[in-house]
Image: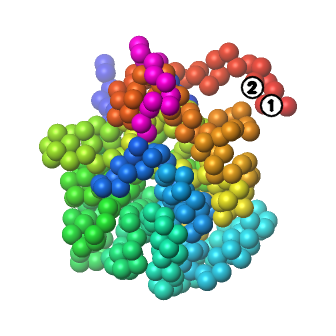
Amino acid sequence: MTEPQFKQLRRAYGFDEVAIVPGDITLNPDQTNIDFKIEDLVFSIPIIAAAMDAVTDVNFAVLMSQMGGFAVLHLEGIQTRYDNPHQVLAEIAQAPQAEVTALLQKIYSAPIKENLIGERIQAIKRQGATCAVSVTPANTKRFAPLTAEAGADILVVQSTVTTARHISKSYRGLIFSELRQAIPMPIIVGNCVSYSACLELMRTGISGVLVGVGPGAACTTREVLGVGVPQVTATIDCAAARDEYLRESGRYVPIITDGGFRRGGDLCKALAAGADAVMLGSILAQAKEAPGRGYHWGMSHPHPALPRGTRIKVGSTGTLEQILFGPTSVTDGSQNLVGAIRTAMGVCGAATIQDMHKAEMVVAPAITTEGKSWQLSQSCH
């Protein structure tokens, strides 16, 4: 007798469980085009620095723009709560581990100074850089006009989970189609992990979607809330939504896989799974120029009642240029990320990122351990 089923579960995959199959044709890596386009803005690398206080400040945003990508400044973080963010960041880096959550809760309880929003945006723009900024859905109506007035280029509306339909106590919540009409710049919204949520967000007229819930190195949402979908499956599902939306509207809305990356191979797998670009946190927090001084922490960490992040020591392994373009000084794949993307695309015969979306992938749980017994035994000592 068969038992009735209350729920059926499907298998979902993360980066370590899949591999990319080489193509039948190969291509010189230097002949690949890895441009990333969001509306009329074109970036020469498909890499975005996350809106996290340990990753992006004014200087890092300028540097990232010079390297061909862009960084997102967190408008509800340390940069907009304090006139002297460097001092506050130094305090976080120096705090003992046992005291850091309480310290972060205290630091992030200071009010946001609206004048600093415009000042930080203008400091980035004065240096000729692309300025992208991030706000949470709850504060979007209040801060979006200030970002437009100050001359920001991209608005990112971001929380752990964002949907097109949100039920709240306010009479009218945030309506993305109205925001789109009101704000004269591309709007990226995140985060989501499902086909239906992604498709609904695209139908509101936004410019891009962030994919990923809880995979970040400093995020504990999955442990605290039990919520999330492994990144490869989440990316494939959202890429299907993007392609369906293209069929129904004729408009291509890029998806950006956000979080869970440890090495170049993960970036390549995200692109093969359908991502148009990637958003990086902990890898870029390792740059010598990053404001976290070798540390990284999640944006949900300072929640006053339910912190969902942890401060991690990532170290300062090299310059931003080394991490993006090499030459690499480490063997773990966390540097020369652009070289890794171009080489993988060459091996797959993919001239563009959209060609890379067609690369075959296989389920391969042993991909990182097969034949690596020497490496694994040495890394234990």
Query: Which portion, as a residue range, is magenta?
Result: 21-34
The secondary structure type at the circle numbered 2 is helix
Q: In which quarter of the image is residue 182?
A: bottom left
* Label 1: which secondary element: helix
Q: Position of residue 81 (x, y in %)?
A: 56, 80
How far across and how far down the image is residue 61, in percent? Answer: 54, 63
Q: Nearer the viewer, residue 363 or 37?
A: 37
Quadrant in which the N terminus is drawn: top left
x and y percentages locating residue 205 in the rendered image: 22, 58
Amino acid carrying label 1: it is Cys
Give the dominant element type of the magenta stretch: helix, strand or loop: loop
In the current view of this chain or complex, which residue is farthest to the right?
A: 381
Which image quadrant for residue 171?
bottom left
Q: In this view, does 301 lie to the left or right of 354?
A: right
Residue 248, visible in the rendered structure? yes
Between 189 and 229, the residue placed more toward the observer is: 189
Mark 1 and mark 2 residues within 8 Å of each other at the beta carbon: yes
- Numbered badge on residue 376: 2
Query: Observer-nearest residue: 12 or 91?
Result: 91
Q: Alpha-carbon neighbours of circle 1 within 10 Å: few (<14), some, or many (≥20)?
A: few
Q: Which amino acid does label 2 sit on?
A: Leu
Image quarter where the C terminus lies is: top right
Q: Is residue 357 left or right of residue 64?
A: left
Report crowding for label 2: few under 14, some 14 to 19, many 20 or more residues within 10 A (C-alpha): few
The residue indicated by pointer 1 is 380
